[in-house]
Image (tube, rainbow, N blue to C red):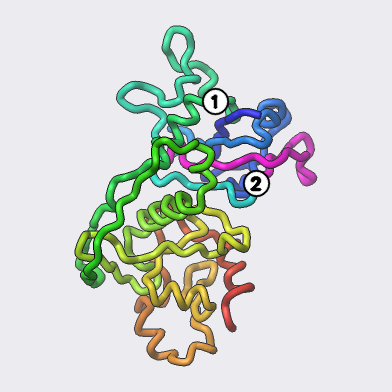
Amino acid sequence: MGFGVFIHRSDSIYDDSPAERYQFPRQYLRRVETCIGDWIIYYEPRKVPGTRGYFAIAKVEQVVADPKAPNMFLALIEPGSYLDFANSVPFSDADGPVEHGVLNEDGRISGRAQAAVRPVSAADFGRIVALGLNDDRPLPLRLDAMAPTVGVQEEPVPFGYDQDRDLVRRLTSRTVRDRIFRRSVLRAYEERCAISGLKLINGGGRAEVTAAHIRPVHANGPDSVNNGIALSGTVHWMFDRGLISLSDDLDILISRQANDQEGVRTLINPTGRARRPEQRFATPHPLFLRWHRSHCFKQ
């Protein structure tokens, strides 16, 4: 077993779904096999416009031949292990590449940095994950006049880690994962409810909007930002109970079983569509939306 870095582009030509599988050619088979049972970091190359850099972690469960593509293989991701970083980690900082293993003996970036799959040392893995997950910065307040902002009094809840904990325990802790997931989703939606358009801020400057899983964790929904949506409390309650849902194009659907149709309509965007995150990768994935309509939404 060993840690690894897997390169993934949002516009990839491969049959990748980072929370579920990673497709790769035979030339990387041995490298991927060394990661079975261990954790990998996803990385988006610098040449990709708006690159996320190192953006997520996952655990490789097994490797199988791709039944649909000759000489291609699939690294299957352990369900529930995928987690988007709270903040993406750039390839380099003021001290140079954060992944020291891509440097040659002369301290220059080597060809290893171009490999789609490469091993990563425990030190590099820990450094990158710490930068990606240990995010104690407050969520920024970006108030604008396009939608109402309401103040709600409550003490802010600080975010942090017990630095003495074992790294793997952090990666599997439900409490830690929920915090990271919330930050990723709220940033994607600029702390505003996607369905109502409201931006509720308490007296301490903390956003009161919640991060909802579209496909819940208990139903094998991943902690990926495209399986999340920012919702205010009442809207979240209705979403979880199937009284509202979304089409693949983010049209807001209201269940016929909602006993106050007019009241519900006053809570949704006048456009009838959910707000779309600015980043394409954060937009709710149709697979998760279809799951919600099939398993939760009351027609």
- Outermost residue, top side: 106
Q: Residue at x 65, y 39 (%)?
A: 60
Left or right placement of residue 25 versus residue 9 in this view: right
Residue 240 percent location from the top left of the image: 51, 73
Does 172 sit above or below residue 214? Answer: above
Q: Which residue is mark 2?
A: 78
Whether residue 50 is visible: no
Residue 8 located within the stretch drawn in magenta: no
Local crowd size for mark 1, using a 10 Å CA cut-off: few (<14), some (14–19), many (≥20):
some
Badge 1 or badge 2: first in the primary sequence = 2
For disc 1, the marked residue is 120
Mark 1: amino acid: Val
Tag 2, which secondary structure?
loop
Residue 277 point in image, percent of width and height = 40, 58
| Number of other residues with Cα within 10 Å of mark 2, as a class: few under 14, some 14 to 19, many 20 or more | some
Name the quarter where the C terminus is drawn: bottom right
Q: Secondary structure at mark 1?
A: loop
Q: Position of residue 293 (x, y in %)?
A: 59, 73
Question: Which of 48 and 218 lies nearest the eye of the viewer?
Answer: 218
- Give the residue type at disc 2: Glu
**Distance from the alpha carbon under mark 1 to that under mark 2:** 19 Å
> Which one is nearer the viewer's eye here, 219 or 47?
219
Query: In the image, what residue occupies the spot 46% across and 55% down?
Result: 178
Query: Is the C-beta separation of discs 1 and 2 under 8 Å?
Result: no
Residue at the location (45% across, 38% down)?
165
Boundaries of the magenta span: 49-76
In magenta stretch: residue 53: yes
Q: Identify which residue, 85 or 52, lies in the foreground.
A: 85
Image quadrant in which you'd find residue 141:
bottom left
* Magenta: main secondary structure: strand
